[in-house]
Image (cartoon, rainbow, N blue to C red):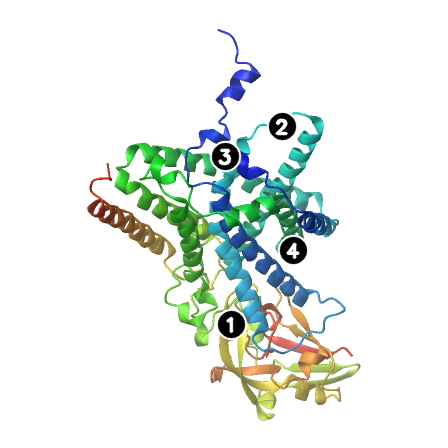
Amino acid sequence: MRLPTVADIERRIPRPEDFESRARGTALTARVGSALGVCFMVCFATGMWSHFQYSTPGWLTLSPNPTQLYRWTQGIHIISGTAAIPLLLVKLWSVFPRLFIRPPKGKQALLVEGLERGSIAALMGSSFFMLASGTLNIIGWYPWEFSFRRTHEAVAWVAIGSLLVHIAIKLPVIRTGLGEKVEHPDAAQEDPAAPTRRSVLNGAFIASGLAVLLTAGQTVPILRRISAFSVRPGDGPQDLPVNRTAAGAGADKTALDPAWRLEVVVGDRTVSLTRDQLLAMPQSTHRLPIACVEGWSRSAVWTGVPVRDLIALVGADPDSDVTVSSLQTKGAFGSSLVVGNVVKDERTLLALELNGETLDVDHGYPARLIAPNRPGVFQTKWVKKMVVTT
Amino acid sequence: MSAETHPVASRGENVVRGLLILTGVGFGLWGLWLMRDFTREQLTSEAFWLAGGVILHDAILAPVVVVVGYAASRLLPAHFRSSTATAFLVWGTLTIAFLPTLSGEGGKAGNDTILGKPYVLSWVVMTLLLVVYAVGAALLRKRRSPGRSS
């Protein structure tokens, strides 16, 4: 018995024409791919907007308006990413036979083919990476060694870059595919019972829509009952979900200590206030959302002292930058910077009450920051100190 | 497939394509630049996750779907094929989309405001509903065109 040669093995590997489903084809790929491309672009734009909240470029001044902006952009970020998952899988199914196209003859053709395949590998790898790391971040599972935020950002540029290259290469094919009728011209004669392109296209859009409907209740209130797979059902103490509990932040004992004082500091001047003294100051009440990077958000009614009134006690201007730090001893984001543009808004509060009750310890008792249009992770809880930095 | 692969691009379109490639390569390089200070351990883990999705898809998921499709086209009664394919598409893609939530991993100790729903039960209900759809649509199809169904 002789060993199989390379040619024998090659004969056993399927060829594109061996895949028999007539539901595949450019007309389907171009349509699903276009929808997927839109999802990726929206996801990329809203994602970069979110990164700007974490490290703000010089040309951008963070603003408290529109109040719900971050809630919308980050909600849309997660929704567009979720919608992309079924579209990506159907899109890849529709072109899978092309994986088996044999390499062309001739050096130049081989080089072009190699570059194109390389761009597709980069696009596939980075697409899977973005969707997998994003959905795992939503549930708070990090089975890897890298920093989620920085790597999700860096790979996003690779994903969109390779997507642009892919669109450039395929542009004439996309144009032709979108111009064609969806159905394969011979499909009905060949095998009338087989799934059609139209049914696959409809299936892709239905699956994509269902993926959104079944998860988006974590940010769209009217979908709360429908969204059986939302990670944040929306309940919690005082009708608001909690990201980090007081125990999880290592603040459960210090937060309930009667000796707690808020310190407001500018230069070498410090004013200390008890919670009763804070309650004796003029209070403001505003309805503001908590909007988290994981894509969940919920509005609540907050009552407390405007931050600009607190820093006025040490003689600081209402548009000063303020660094707010927490009692927390565990986990990241123990302090946050509030830029002057946000401090001067009277809705930027050191909140003492939530939905008409004394703040729950898991929501930041004795006092927490709440400001409009701001990622949840910067709404510092268990506030210990406010330092005026300009 | 052969005739569709080589439509001719106009000159204006080629200008757009060139700009897209330049922008795309620039974006990709910027992404790599942002990784310049990652440690070897971080990069190895990242590479594992980048390659893992492609390998899982091309070597396992896609061939399994091809085999399932091939088997279904031979084994299922004709009027069942279309509705089963649609139900399988929706079931498969949604199951993958919800895998993290279904995994039982994640969440935070002492925090029941995250992952607080009976997800596996919902997944079983979703699966049953799609089976009902596949069977119901197949029976409707058979009733409508009894002559063409076999």
Q: Are marks 2 and 1 in contact (CB under 8 Å)?
A: no
Q: Are marks 3 and 1 on the same chain?
A: yes
Image: A367 above or below B30 = below
Label 1 resides on the chain identified as A
The amino acid at mark 1 is Asp
Categorize mark 3 by other alpha carbons within 10 Å: few (<14), some (14-19), many (20+): some
Residue sitting at 27 percent across and 49 percent down?
B137
The residue that disc 4 covers is A153
The residue that disc 2 covers is A104
Badge nearest the viewer, 4 or 1? 4
Name the quadrant containing residue A107. Answer: top right
Q: At numbered mark 4, what does the secondary structure look like: helix, strand or loop?
A: helix
Q: Compute the Cα span from label 3 to label 1.
A: 53 Å
Badge nearest the viewer, 2 or 1? 2
Q: Compute the Cα span from label 2 to label 1.
A: 63 Å
Q: Compute the Cα span from label 2 to label 3.
A: 16 Å
**Outermost top residue:** A1
The amino acid at mark 2 is Pro
The residue that disc 1 covers is A362
